Amino acid sequence: IQEKAHQSLKSEAIYAQYDFFSALEIYFDSSIKECLKSEDILIKILCLLDRRIGKRTLIKMNDTITSEHPLVQDFFKLRCEVENVKVVI
């Protein structure tokens, strides 16, 4: 029951502190490509904040970003705004 409740909270983007530290550990141990394919919202957000994601990658992501969680979309918009990349969301 505890695991089910934890997954339910994560799906609603409600995280505990240990979830953040776990996501950081996975993020640091993985490549950018792996992180972009991750199902974890926190890992994708961390990836979007990484400077290794450039304008070309942001432009490629523009086609598929609508299928992502709204928080990921918000960080995507923020990053595109900073990089002066036109967003079609």
Image (cartoon, rainbow, N blue to C red):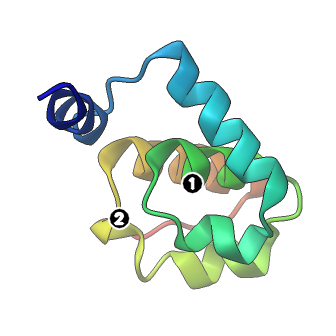
In screen coordinates, is 88 left or right of 5?
right
Q: Nearer the viewer, residue 39 or 4?
A: 4
> In x, y percent, where is residue 7?
25, 39
Q: Quadrant of the C terminus?
A: bottom left
Mark 1: few/some/many CA within 10 Å (<14, 14-19, 20+): many
Is residue 80 visible from the viewing direction of this image? yes
Q: Nearer the viewer, residue 39 or 80?
A: 39
Q: Earlier in the sequence, mark 1 or mark 2?
A: 1
Q: Nearer the viewer, residue 34 or 70?
A: 34
**Residue at 40%, 41% in the rendered image:** 71
**Which amino acid type is marked by label 2?**
Ile
The residue pinned by badge 1 equals: 44
In screen coordinates, is 79 left or right of 28?
left
Where residue 33 sits, quadrant-wise, is bottom right
Q: Secondary structure at mark 1?
A: helix
> In x, y percent, where is residue 38?
52, 65
**Residue at 31%, 35% in the rendered image:** 10
The residue pinned by badge 2 equals: 89
**Which amino acid type is marked by label 1?**
Lys
Mark 2: few/some/many CA within 10 Å (<14, 14-19, 20+): few
Where residue 88 sits, quadrant-wise, is bottom left
> In x, y percent, where is residue 11?
24, 42
Is residue 82 visible from the viewing direction of this image? no
